Structure formats: C-alpha cells, structure tokens
Amino acid sequence: MSDLLAGRTAVVTGAASGNGRAIARRFAEEGADVVVADVREEPREGGEPTHELVAAETDAEATFVECDVRDPADLEAAVEAAEAFGGVDVMVNNAGIYRPENFLETSEDEFDQLMNINAKGVYFGAQAAAKRMVARAEAGEADGPAPVIINMSSAAGLRGDGRLVTYSMSKGAVRLFTYALADALGDAGIRVNAIHPGFIETAMTTEDVELVGTETEARMSKAIPSGRFGQPSEVADAAVYLASEMAGYVTGESLVVDGGMSNT
C-alpha cells in the first residue's frame, strides 16, 4: 500500500463488523494505528476480532474499546484510548443501526434507540474527538496533516424513504450536522465530511433485513446503475480518501457511495 495515513491514529466506532471493520483494516494497511470502538468484540460476519486482524495483517497497532455510542462517557473513553498511540487524528463516527418501519406504528422507544445511536452517537463522538484535536492545536502540539472527522450518513440521508422514516431522519441529521460542524471547526483546521453509502453487503442487509441473495436484491439492483450492491471495502476506500491529504481541500461535503442509485 501507499502509506497514505502513516503516523496517524484513527478511532472508528462500530468497527467490529461491516463497514467499520473494513475501514479499520484499510486505515491500518495505509499506516494508521486504530482504536476499534464497538459494543461487541466479535465480528458479526465471523473471524478474528478486528484489532487482532489488524495486528496480524499489518505493522499498525490496534486496540479494542467497548463502546456504546449512546453513552458520551464511552465515546470519551474510546478517544482517550487513542492517546496511547499519540492521540486521535481521524475520527470515524460509523456505528449505526438500520430498521424498516411502519411510521404509524413506531414507538417512542424504537425512535429513541435509532436516533440515539445514529445521530446522538455521531454528535458526541465528533465532540469528544474535536476537543482533543483543538486542544493539541492550541498547545502547539499539532503537526502534519489536518485532523479529520468522518461521519457515516446514508443514501437515505439524501432523500426520504417512506419505509425508513426514522432512519432517514437520523441520517439526514448527520448530513446537516456534518456541514455545520465543518463550518464550526474550520478555523481550527479540522476537516469534516460525510459518507453516504447505499446498499452495502453487510450484516445489516444479510441478517437485520434479509436483502442479499433474495429476489428483493435482484429487483433493487436493477435500479442501481452499477447493477449491484456495494462491498464494505468500497466504503473503506472512500474513507481512506477523505482521511488522507488527497482530500486536503475537501470539507463540509458528502461523498456518495451507492453505485449511482441516488441520482436515478
């Protein structure tokens, strides 16, 4: 690999599985040390825990921190763990849940669960990282590339879906939060961007909502110009770009990784 993230330290929430796992592995391949923050250590897709896989596959260092993103104290602990590697340079607020619903039957508890993970978790994850990024800059300790915050939104954060009312709301909130935060942190030299995945082959689309390998996937794929669901590695490639100096003049933006689905 090209060591695009050499000398950097990243915190990735929801990194035990799916997109987060792929992001953590790609970051490590590009030279970054990684804090894997998740409510569970074992990957949903099976195999070695992400931090152990990073250690086996790369020269990067990695550690696991149990983290429920609904709890700001857990997010603070995850970011604090990055101090062992020199402090957080890249924060990826990836953890999220996906659930179709009937709007008329959605309960307050269901609403709160989804919003607390998908929106509140992103807000306070970004805040925990930004506090340390700003403090390092003010202390004159920051050197090298600008700090980066990447928030995971969704194609559903770009356009509404009647089957995903609360999910669309949460991901739309992440999109506008990203734009506002880029403005708020621009003077501190922190870049903030969002990734908007479409249908990606993870446990969310194989187990939580069974789409992959079904007639539904075949039908939905026809509406995607690329003709297929995406892979976590493709989301990870987008994250590497945004975290690296290749995106040095990119902030307050949405990078859509959905095979063209949103524009058809």
Image: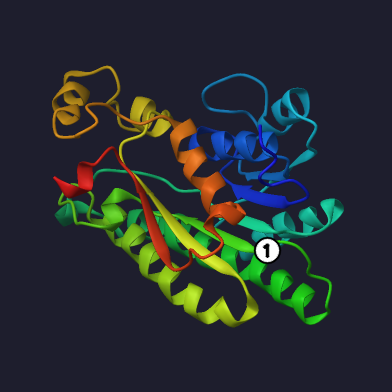
**Which corner quadrant of the image does residue 26 belong to?**
top right
Which is more toward the observer, 123 or 40? Answer: 123
Left or right of residue 207, residue 237 in this image: right
Q: Residues within 10 Å of mark 1 (few under 14, many from 20)?
A: some
Left or right of residue 88, residue 262 in this image: left
Q: Position of residue 126 (x, y in %)?
A: 58, 65
Which is more toward the observer, 90 or 237? Answer: 237
Which colour assignment does the render follow?
rainbow
| Whether residue 71 is visible | no
Which is more toward the observer, 154 or 235? Answer: 235
Q: What's the residue at 68%, 47% (across, down)?
A: 5
Q: What's the residue at 71%, 54% (across, down)?
A: 78
**Which corner quadrant of the image does residue 2 belong to?**
top right
Circle 1: residue type: Ala
Left or right of residue 203, residue 81 in this image: right
Q: What's the residue at 13%, 45% (across, down)?
A: 264
Screen quadrant of the N terminus: top right
Q: Position of residue 244 (x, y in %)?
A: 60, 52
- In the rendered view, tell whether residue 187 sits above or below residue 44: below
Left or right of residue 118, residue 21 in this image: right
- In the rendered view, tell whether residue 48 sits above or below residue 194: above
Q: Position of residue 124 (x, y in %)?
A: 57, 67
Name the secondary structure under disc 1: helix
Q: Position of residue 30 (x, y in %)?
A: 67, 39
Q: What's the residue at 35%, 60% (across, down)?
A: 170
Which is more toward the observer, 197 or 170? Answer: 197
| Whether residue 221 is visible | yes
**How many numbered discs?**
1
- In the rendered view, tell whether residue 256 sits above or below residue 20: below
Per the image, the residue denoted by label 1 is 73
